[in-house]
Image (tube, rainbow, N blue to C red):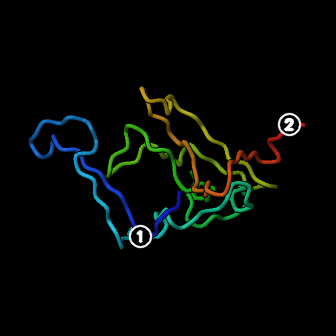
Amino acid sequence: MALIPNTWIATHDLGNTEGGFKNYDYNDHVYLLKNAKPESAALDPSVGGLFPGSPGLVFDFNKTYTGSLSDKDGQTIGFTSTQLNNNDTFKTKTSYSPTLLDIDSSGLGTLSVTTTTGSNGASDNTLVNGLQTTFDGRAAKSIYQHPACRST
């Protein structure tokens, strides 16, 4: 499978907004959109990200990471987004709470994440601060564990 730059496939299921019966088959219309780019280049999936194991995906928490989320003091944490939850809307994003994140930048630095009630399960999906970052998984199958987390 290969990405085709500036090409998108979109689907549309009739009902609800059109005043008709919603049948939940998810593919009443299928569109091929060519020569289109996202408004933000950071959202373009045809631009490859870092590969698992790349040094740029190892966060030392004592550096500044431009374009990443911030902790309660405004220090950048390296992670670029959170997993969306059921309470997120177009105007509010309850899946991200910087007040529950705290960087200690001494030494290699640590990131403390205070948890709240919730999970990312299908029945609940109210997880707050399910931190994530973009990586490019097309190179090979990969499982990466930071060296500091490996047991000997």
- Number of numbered tags placed on the structure image: 2
Closer to the camera in the image, 68 or 142:
142
Image mark for residue 6 = 1
Secondary structure of residue under mark 1: loop
- Compared across the picture, whether 15 is left or right of 12 comes to left
Q: Residue at x 53, y 32 (%)?
A: 116
Q: Residue 125, relative to residue 2: is it above or below?
A: above
Q: Are marks 2 and 1 in contact (CB under 8 Å)?
A: no
Q: Residue at x 15, y 45 (%)?
A: 17
- Type of amino acid at the residue the image marks with label 1: Asn
Q: Residues within 10 Å of mark 2 (few under 14, many from 20)?
A: few
Q: Residue at x 72, y 56 (%)?
A: 58
- Compared across the picture, whether 8 is left or right of 50 comes to left
Q: Residues within 10 Å of mark 1 (few under 14, many from 20)?
A: some
| x then y, percent, for residue 100 | 56, 42
Residue denoted by label 2: 151
Mark whose residue sits in front, 2 or 1: 1
